Image: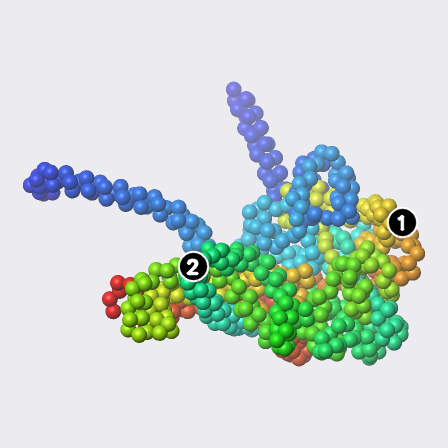
Amino acid sequence: MTSVAHSTTVPGPRRGARRSFSRFLRAETWAAYAFILPWAIGFIALTAGPMAASLYFSLTNYGVEQIAGFAATEYVGAANYRQVLEDEKIRTSLYNTLFYTVLSVPAKMAVALGLAMILARLLRFAGFFRTVFYLPDITPPVAIGIMLLLLFNGSVGIVNTVLGWFGIPGPFWTTDPNWIKPSLVIMSVWTIGGTMVIYLAALKSVPRHLYEAAAMDGAKPWRQFKDVTLPMISPALFFTFIILTIAGLQTFTEVYTAYFGTGSAGAESPDAALMNVVYLFRQAFEFFNMGYASAMAWLLFVIIMIVTAIQFVVSRRFVFYQGEKR
Amino acid sequence: MAGRWKGRVLLVAAAALLGLTAASAAGAAPAATTSASQSGTLNIYGFGPGDDVANGRAEYAAAQLGRGVTINNPRGGFNDQAFLAMLASRNVPDVVYMNRNAIGSYAARGALVPLASCLRAERIDLSQYRAGALNEVRYRGQVYALPEFTNQITLIVNNTVAQQAGVNVNDIQTTNWAKLRQANRKMLRIENGQVTRIGFDPKIPEFFPLWVKWFGADIVSKDGRTPRLNSPQAIAALEFTHSLIRDHGGWDRFKAFRDTWDFFGRQNQVARNQVGAWPMESWYYNVLADNSPGVDITAKYFTNRRGGPITFFQGNGWVIPRGSKNPGLACKWMKAMTSQEAWLKVAKDRFDLRKRQGREFTGLYTANGRADVKIYQDIFQPMGRRNFDEAVQKLVQVSRYGFAVPVSPAGAEIRQAYLDAINRVLAGQQTPRAALNQAQREAVAAVRRNSR
């Protein structure tokens, strides 16, 4: 009653405006929900759902019998996680994965930034070179895995042939455990097209007047790069740093193709190439230890979360957002 | 009125009972039966696209099933992920073609149907199959698959290389390891730090069980529950085979050179004298006969320490997955596909085809011993090339001495454990003893995990 009495005190035109605005708000809200809905359904069905399922499986003995419904899924507590901590192969695979990520992420960022800076200065044929540099990114990872074996063959590979022209005896990249991971890192640098395009866009958005002001203050190119370019593109650098790190920690296809899925059915698969997701895949789909593989997946997820959190904390000192108050 | 209702109730009850019976027979049959009718659809998975031998037998098997049966074969190799998806969706094929080394893992998990009733119903005589191949598909006393090829292994000796190196072909054998190592050292060639010819390739890690069998030992107990990867015999076998590779300057040089071979081409490693000798599966004689029939080779038995021939069987087999809607048809199909008649038909067809093409017929080597004998006696004709003719004789004979790694519920993991161990040794990361000790720990843990 009170509300009715109160509403009657509101002048007519103002009350109508508020009501229509409220209706508009409701319509806007529903429209927003409608637009979000496809993504939300996809997220729940394809990401959150499987994640929740894998968390549950990681606490069970889930395997072929349970998949096929021949046996009940049994709760095994933290047994899979305990086993993860005891598994020698997990340690090997995590070391390999971290080694690969630590080397490949900076290498990819540096090469992509260098190429982007060259492209940003090109006045002619920029589009052509942009396309050429991006092409490796659309090469199927399986093909890259096969190419790795051909290019880096210790006897007749192109890489060692070229090194030989300069009198450098190339190593046995694909068979020497000390050189397997470096060769994978070098090969990964080949696919930096996407990162390069992000950097190119960031470089193009740096206001020219900042460089002009820096030049007037006597800043040389290196100083301009360090004090103007890097801070201005730091959000893009940070974004790719995060994305490449996560991708590095999840690397799979190229390595699996090159070393684990060959005609010899993985007979010549060196431990030096055993990445964490490769081992996870083997546990799940070759040995059928789905519960154990799920525990491995959650361990990797936690590692990625920790690494990303550290990156976010550290980034506060190095990443500059335009308009940000410090 | 009451009588009509009573009749209807009885009819409905009878129909429901019939439905339930049919559903339980189709969905939860504990073993393959031939209760299904001779019409319907047979869903095949993991088979094809095949060569003339595979397709010819498929035609024969289809004819045995009769016109009322529709065969649905999507043609594609077996894939664990795809098969798991089928199991998960309860939409399993009726019959599956898979590698025999995977059968233990699936059988132990209840995903395959034991073939006892299939064998009984179709009167399949197991004695026609080679015992070594059957051992690879037998788990806890039950047969789970009918085996196809055996891919027996013999030594292929390149006479030209042996002659160039001044090695007597008789010294290229596996009975006396000291002599074999001497021959290896003489035949290999290293130029400017690069291997340009392999003396003797022991083919490890793939053929490691064969080298362990040299002692009469196995890498896993007969019941598949006790891995024996770090037995003194296994360690000695790895030490010796590794020494053959070390003679070439190490695995990196050895493998890098081997990876450059044109294995399936005219310029293969035998034609180009890039290898002295190595143990190899039977199908490779076909490759040589097709691409470089002029090569001068000698086929020899892989012998154990007493000089007796031994060979290692590997290959595919037909299984019936649990939940197969038509196990009866599946049973008939696999019986026909592995029958003596089917093998003889395709062998004759291939012989005729090769004759028309002016190419050699180097035989078929199957898990059906009777078929092999008939093919050799009735179809095979010497091709006039002494080396290939002798090779065929050897391949026929050696099948009697075949063995397979015993089936284990952790078969895939045990295999991976020893493959990884050997790779660590080859890469110089561990000694044979340390590597095989680690492999043993991994294999024991895998067996324990799979026996819960």
Q: Quadrant of the C terminus of chain B?
A: bottom right
x then y, percent, for residue A27: 26, 41
Q: What is the C-alpha distance between the residues marked 1 and 2?
A: 74 Å
Which residue is the site of mark 2?
A123
Left or right: where B352 falls relative to A74: right
Residue drawn at (62%, 71%), measured in percent from left and top?
A: A162
- Crowdedness of circle 1 by 10 Å Cα count: few (<14), some, many (20+)? some
Residue drawn at (87%, 64%), measured in percent from left and top?
A: B296
Q: Is residue B267 above or below residue A317?
A: above
x then y, percent, for residue B195: 73, 74
Q: In the depicted view, which residue is nearer to us: B38 or B181?
A: B181
Which residue is the site of mark 1?
B379
Q: In the depicted view, which residue is nearer to us: B16 or B90?
A: B90
- Crowdedness of circle 2 by 10 Å Cα count: few (<14), some, many (20+)? few
x then y, percent, for residue B184: 80, 76
Q: Chain of mark 2?
A: A
Q: Is residue B248 above or below residue A238?
A: below
Front of the two marks 1 and 2: 2
x then y, percent, for residue B31: 68, 48
Residue B244: assigned label: none
Q: In the depicted view, which residue is nearer to us: B187 or A132?
A: A132
